[in-house]
Image (cartoon, helix red, strand yellow):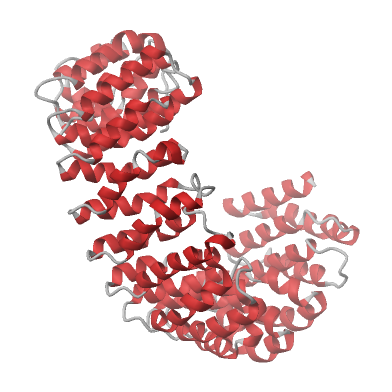
């Protein structure tokens, strides 16, 4: 939160809302202290004025300072929070959000933080869900803040335990639901056994809403427990939640296993005995919502089991993969789509053998799924699966090549873009994917500009994969030069951004012979046409020169030739073109080579100084000034 803090004892400037709402004069308002002004607005203002006041609560607190906040402001806020009937939910929600800013900036000691607990307890019992949720966020924030002072004094721990017991034993479910979200962090702070016991009671509560909240936060408590000895006491209730009659409870109990993290990875025997059966049952649950929720977190759950890389648990790892396969083949599209999102994670988790035996046979069905979201996520998944070295190159070409070609011909651009946006990661394999390359060439004429932009990003990588002759003879005329003249700026920019890759792959001599003449020709034709094309070519020259600077000692005159072309842009009749030319020169004036420094001092800097003296456009002047400053700093 960004705050403009007034000096201590000085009132923040009154807002228009405040001035209109209070039945007092503006001069009187301006003379009031921050706390008096806040009270006046809360006690006598309308709802709009109270909302305005609550939004300004951090400003008031920082204006008062730590001492007066504790002595004056917090007691008043307690009074407001405990009012019966409660004030508007919007005000309570704002109060919960703004109190986070007090800790640790104003209230850093545990005893000071404890002053907020009565307010948190009250907010945790409110009917409105968003207020209760924010009270949980606030309490957890307080716990994290007090971690720096752990271990806490016994009286502070006792106060926190008493608050938790009151919430967990409340007559109405709202307080119990809130306590379920607080107890894991409270246990993590204090390591007090009562918090674990209270959470266990919530897990068997007769109210489904309470059991749902307990199931949702169960994994966080298991993580806080930190060991199987303490967790053993809670396993029976976790099993009970996972088999609850309410599918809304089961779905949360299954998903919460992903929150455990790697705490129990060193105890795979324990996870095999207690967690794996829950995973197996959930993957075949009759409720699609349970399967869907498990699909959304499957990768995290699998990693928390600790089976990866342990030969002793190879069969158990295969069982986990079989559960994942059942979700990938689920009858519900939502479950399939969510599961496909973890496909790459499971490939890297299981390794090449499990991929071949379990996942690869499913790929054709996923690639032809009737639901576009499944195909789109599958396209992204196979690209991510190709990274990391888990799968051999030959296996990637064999299993993914036909699918990538199919995705590039999909009727939905979202599917095509998932491949185009990531295909550069497989550029070293494109020499074995002729069908993919043909599809990319056809897509350079796509009606959707995002597809053309994706193709433009890929073309330099195709030069790396298929060779410079292929680029010059097959890609240059029908694709590269066409996209460089595309009517959509983002497509042209994609070509410009690819220049460093092309320079690195091709070298200066090839660029001088093949690319530079084409760019010069286009610029010459555009002098009587669109200035936007001239801007694009100048940007391409600048990126080329910059790329040459980053690979010194390679010989050639490419840097000097491109700089000469940029200098021509300084005399353009359109101010925007001159500005881009100056910006391009700013990128090249940092060159280190002696011959390049000579060009900078003898041609570039005089041209910039001359243009700055004659230029009438403010943006061009600023660009020239920045370029000169960059040259002088060098």
Instruction: Name the quadrant of the N terminus.
Output: top left
Q: Horizontal and vertical percent for residue 418?
A: 47, 72
Task: Specify the quadrant of the image occupied by residue 106.
Answer: top left
Q: State the residue in front, 454 or 350.
A: 350
Residue 328 is left or right of residue 386, and the answer is: left
Q: State the residue in front, 557 or 580.
A: 557
Q: Horizontal and vertical percent for residue 356?
A: 53, 78
Q: State the residue in front, 364 or 439.
A: 364
> Where is 523 relative to 581, above or below?
below
Residue 436 is left or right of residue 17, and the answer is: right
Q: Residue at x 19, y 30 (%)?
A: 125
Q: Residue at x 17, y 31 (%)?
A: 126
How many discs mark residues in the rendered view? 0
Residue 503 is left or right of residue 185, and the answer is: right
Q: State the residue in front, 255 or 632.
A: 255
Furthest toward the left, the residue is 85
Task: Specify the quadrant of the image occupied by residue 587.
Answer: bottom right
Q: Horizontal and vertical percent for residue 303?
A: 49, 56
Residue 65 appears in the figure? no
Residue 590 is left or right of residue 582, and the answer is: right
Q: Residue at x 49, y 44 (%)?
A: 263
Residue 274 appears in the figure? yes
> Where is 485 relative to 18, above or below?
below
Task: Specify the quadrant of the image occupied by residue 378.
Answer: bottom left
Q: Horizontal and vertical percent for residue 561?
A: 79, 72
> Where is 613 relative to 430, above or below?
above
């Amino acid at each position: 939160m960004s705050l403009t803090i007034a000096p201590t004892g000085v009132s923040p400037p009154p807002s228009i809302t405040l001035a209109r709402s209070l039945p007092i004069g503006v001069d009187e308002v301006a003379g009031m202290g921050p706390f008096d002004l806040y009270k006046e607005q809360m006690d006598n203002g309308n709802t709009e004025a109270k909302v305005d006041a609550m939004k300004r609560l951090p400003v008031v607190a920082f204006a008062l300072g730590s001492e007066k906040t504790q002595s004056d402001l917090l007691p008043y806020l307690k009074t407001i929070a405990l009012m019966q009937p409660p004030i508007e939910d919007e005000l309570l929600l704002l109060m919960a959000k703004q109190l986070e800013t007090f800790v640790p900036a104003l209230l850093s000691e545990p005893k000071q933080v404890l002053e907020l607990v009565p307010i948190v307890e009250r907010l945790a019992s409110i009917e409105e869900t968003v207020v209760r949720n924010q009270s949980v966020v606030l309490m957890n924030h307080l716990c994290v803040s007090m971690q720096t002072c752990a271990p806490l004094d016994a009286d502070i721990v006792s106060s926190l335990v008493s608050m938790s017991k009151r919430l967990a034993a409340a007559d109405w479910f709202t307080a119990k639901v809130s306590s379920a979200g607080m107890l894991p962090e409270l246990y993590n702070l204090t390591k007090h056994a009562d918090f674990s016991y209270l959470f266990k009671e919530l897990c068997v509560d007769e109210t489904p809403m309470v059991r749902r909240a307990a199931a949702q936060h169960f994994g966080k408590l298991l993580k806080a427990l930190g060991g199987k000895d303490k967790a053993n006491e809670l396993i029976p209730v976790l099993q009970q939640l996972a088999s609850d009659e309410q599918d809304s409870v089961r779905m949360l109990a299954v998903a919460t296993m992903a929150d455990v993290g790697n705490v129990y990875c060193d105890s795979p025997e324990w996870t095999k005995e207690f967690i794996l059966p829950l995973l197996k049952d959930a993957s075949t649950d009759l409720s699609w919502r349970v399967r869907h929720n498990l699909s959304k977190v499957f990768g995290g759950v699998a990693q928390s089991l600790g089976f990866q890389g342990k030969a002793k648990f190879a069969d158990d790892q295969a069982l986990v993969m079989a559960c994942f396969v059942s979700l990938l083949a689920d009858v519900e599209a939502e479950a399939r789509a969510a599961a496909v999102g973890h496909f790459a994670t499971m490939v890297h988790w299981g390794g090449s053998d499990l991929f071949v035996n379990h996942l690869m046979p499913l790929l054709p069905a996923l690639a032809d799924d009737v639901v576009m979201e499944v195909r789109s996520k599958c396209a992204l998944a196979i690209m991510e699966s190709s990274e990391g070295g888990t799968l051999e190159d030959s296996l990637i070409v064999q299993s993914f090549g036909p699918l990538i070609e199919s995705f590039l011909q999909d009727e939905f651009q979202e599917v095509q873009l998932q491949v185009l946006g990531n295909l550069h990661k497989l550029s070293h394999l494109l020499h074995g994917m002729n069908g993919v390359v043909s599809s990319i060439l056809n897509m350079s004429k796509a009606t959707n500009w995002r597809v053309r932009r994706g193709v433009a990003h890929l073309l330099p990588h195709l030069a790396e994969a298929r060779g410079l002759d292929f680029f010059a003879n097959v890609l240059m005329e029908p694709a590269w030069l066409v996209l460089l003249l595309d009517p959509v700026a983002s497509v042209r920019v994609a070509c410009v951004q690819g220049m460093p890759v092309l320079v690195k792959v091709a070298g200066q001599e090839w660029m001088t012979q093949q690319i530079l003449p084409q760019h010069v020709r286009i610029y010459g034709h555009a002098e009587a046409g669109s200035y936007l094309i001239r801007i694009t070519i100048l940007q391409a020259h600048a990126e080329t020169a910059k790329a040459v600077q980053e690979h010194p000692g390679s010989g050639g005159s490419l840097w000097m030739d491109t700089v000469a072309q940029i200098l021509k842009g300084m005399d353009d009749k359109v101010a925007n073109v001159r500005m881009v030319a100056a910006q391009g020169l700013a990128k090249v004036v940092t060159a280190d080579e002696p011959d390049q420094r000579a060009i900078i001092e003898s041609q570039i800097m005089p041209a910039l100084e001359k243009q700055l003296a004659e230029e009438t456009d403010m943006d061009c002047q600023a660009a020239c000034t920045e370029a000169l400053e960059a040259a002088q700093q060098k």
